[in-house]
Amino acid sequence: MKFQLLTAAVAAAISMSAVAAPVTYTIDSGHTFPSFEADHKGGLSIWRGKFNKTSGSITLDRAAKTGSVDITVDATSIDFGHDKLNAHVSSADMLDVAKFPTATFKGNKVHFNGDVPASIDGEFTLHGVTKPLTLTINKFKCVQDNMTKREVCGADASATFNRADFGVNYGEKYGFNMDVKLAIQVEAAEKK
């Protein structure tokens, strides 16, 4: 009888460990800065900027190889390191942040390479227009934070999109290339 109970307990423990629950992580806004590269005057130079305010959450179930991402970027926090350019890109000529103060990415399909997320398919909304976008995850790592005693995950993701597809086509008639390269550093802590 004791052997049967022990066997049942071991089987239950193995079963529980094989079925991992999804874990939700809250974006650390102090360590998450979506940045981008955009053409200036048809290849004359490349301007680089970032957004200083980002929030959201990521949910991963590594055992089931599923997950989701819900990120909001404060478009008013755009920063080229050049005040005049910040003001112009924020204006109705481009992002029109008074009318469209946020950009969002809602990813619902995570593709894994082994045990590591490799890409996320989702919907990107910019300037009031929503289009499909796939983020490629170039690096991904999770560690136990010694100070908070929570799991913290970090990633480097990238994508390219055509800004004219989102109605942000300023400069197109002057020969500006409409492709924008995204490079997103993100850190997120396990939600308790």
Image (cartoon, rainbow, N blue to C red):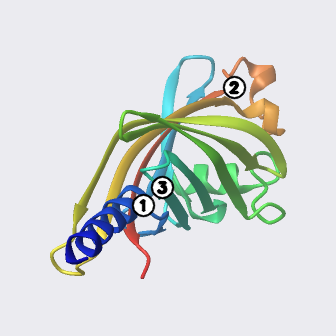
Q: Amino acid at mark 3?
A: Asp
Image location of residue 147, percent across then percent down: 18, 80
Instruction: Find disc 1 in the rendering and name its residue.
Output: 20
Image location of residue 172, percent across then percent down: 77, 24
Image location of residue 64, percent across then percent down: 49, 48
- Disc 3 on helix, strand or loop? strand
| Closer to us: 146 or 105 | 146
Instruction: Find disc 3 in the rendering and name its residue.
Output: 61
* Residue drawn where x is 45% and y is 40% of the image: 157
From what the image shows, is residue 45 above or below residue 3?
Answer: above
Q: Amino acid at mark 2?
A: Met
User: Which image quadrant is residue 83 in?
Assistant: bottom right
CB within 8 Å, label 3 to label 2: no
User: Which image quadrant is residue 87 in?
Assistant: bottom right
Instruction: Find disc 2 in the rendering and name its residue.
Output: 178
* Residue drawn where x is 57% and y is 64% of the image: 77
Q: CA distance from mark 3 to mark 1?
A: 7 Å
The single residue placed furthest to the left in the displayed view is: 146
From what the image shows, is residue 35 above or below residue 13?
Answer: above
Label ID, residue 149: none
Q: Nearer the viewer, mark 3 or mark 1?
A: 1
* Residue drawn where x is 75% and y is 21% of the image: 174
**Label 3: how many Cα within 10 Å (few below 14, some 14–19, many 20+):** some
Q: Amino acid at mark 1?
A: Ala
Image location of residue 135, percent across then percent down: 55, 37
- Image quadrant in which the C terminus is located: bottom left
- Image quadrant in which the N terminus is located: bottom left
CB within 8 Å, label 3 to label 1: yes
